[in-house]
Amino acid sequence: MLRLTDVSKIYEGKSQVKALTGVSFAIESGEMVAVMGPSGSGKSTLLNLMGGLDVPTAGSVEVAGRDLAKEDEESRSLFRRTHVSYIFQAYHLMPTLTAAQNVALPLHIAGVPRKEVDERVDRALQEVGLGARDRHLPDELSGGERQRVAIARALVTGAALLLADEPTGNLDTVRGAEILALLRSIHERGSATIVMVTHDPSAASACDRRLEIRDGRLVGDNRN
């Protein structure tokens, strides 16, 4: 599903910043993997590269057999619509849209017929336990419910690669544990590959495998 080979990322500016240096690993289809590291270690940069939001300075990033490092921005954008979904720490929900409308957004962008959109949105909200909250606006939902909406929005596309950036970072311990249990349940019921960036050991323990990044280098690769 995912293979990085000798990936480096350098940001040029007033001073040169080496975000990643010589990172190599492979993730098989269906794995649930945590990427851990302190702030500034390069884990968010790594997530952006895996999703095709950015390209490496050197090396290759293969997702589903395609080297995104060799593709232009338009090609990567089209690839993400059908192959990659994101769950963000800050939810990124549209405040004037209901839960159902937020979940439907990526399907409308992809040009999915309305009837199919309604069916897929209903199924995704039911899967995350929010079937009865479909008409609520984000500010009418708790933090945990907003994150469930964000997860439903990621699931509704059917993408094979699900990337989660600190999905429990804005939640208290109880709500965070609920979201982790939900992600684990989704992983066990489906076939999606899940990669989660986190600094929380309890979140990492919910995954099958843990990659550790420090100072832009891969320093650990362990199975839980």
Image (spheres, rainbow, N blue to C red):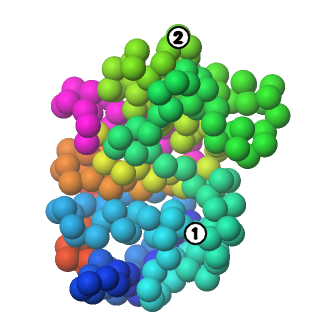
Residue that numbered label 2 is attached to? 132
| Residue 180 in picture, x, y percent from top left | 33, 37
Q: Quadrant of residue 67?
A: bottom right
| Residue 224 in picture, x, y percent from top left | 27, 55
- Side of 97 where 170 appears, left or right: left
Kind of residue sitting beneath label 1: Val
Kind of residue sitting beneath label 2: Ala
The answer to whether 124 is drawn above or below residue 195 in the figure is above
Residue 133 can be seen in this image? yes
Residue that numbered label 1 is attached to? 63
Q: Which residues are magenta?
A: 169-191
Residue at x 41% of width, y 38% of height: 91
Give the Cα distance between marks 2 and 1: 36 Å
| Residue 219 in picture, x, y percent from top left | 22, 76
Q: Could you tell me which quadrant the N terminus lies in?
A: bottom right
- Side of 202 where 8 appears, left or right: right
Mark 1 surroundings within 10 Å by alpha-carbon count, few (fewer than 14), some (14 through 19), many (20 or more): many
Of helix, strand and loop, which mostly describes the magenta segment? helix
Q: Earlier in the sequence, mark 2 or mark 1?
A: 1
The answer to whether 108 is drawn above or below residue 6 in the figure is above
Tag count: 2
| Residue 136 in picture, x, y percent from top left | 50, 14
The answer to whether 1 is drawn above or below residue 174 in the figure is below
Residue that sits furthest to the front in the current view: 14
Mark 2 surroundings within 10 Å by alpha-carbon count, few (fewer than 14), some (14 through 19), many (20 or more): few
Residue 177 can be seen in this image? no
- Side of 5 where 10 appears, left or right: left
SS category of the residue bearing label 1: strand
Q: Quadrant of residue 176?
A: top left
The answer to whether 94 is drawn above or below residue 200 in the figure is above
Q: Is residue 190 magenta?
A: yes
Q: Is residue 54 magenta?
A: no
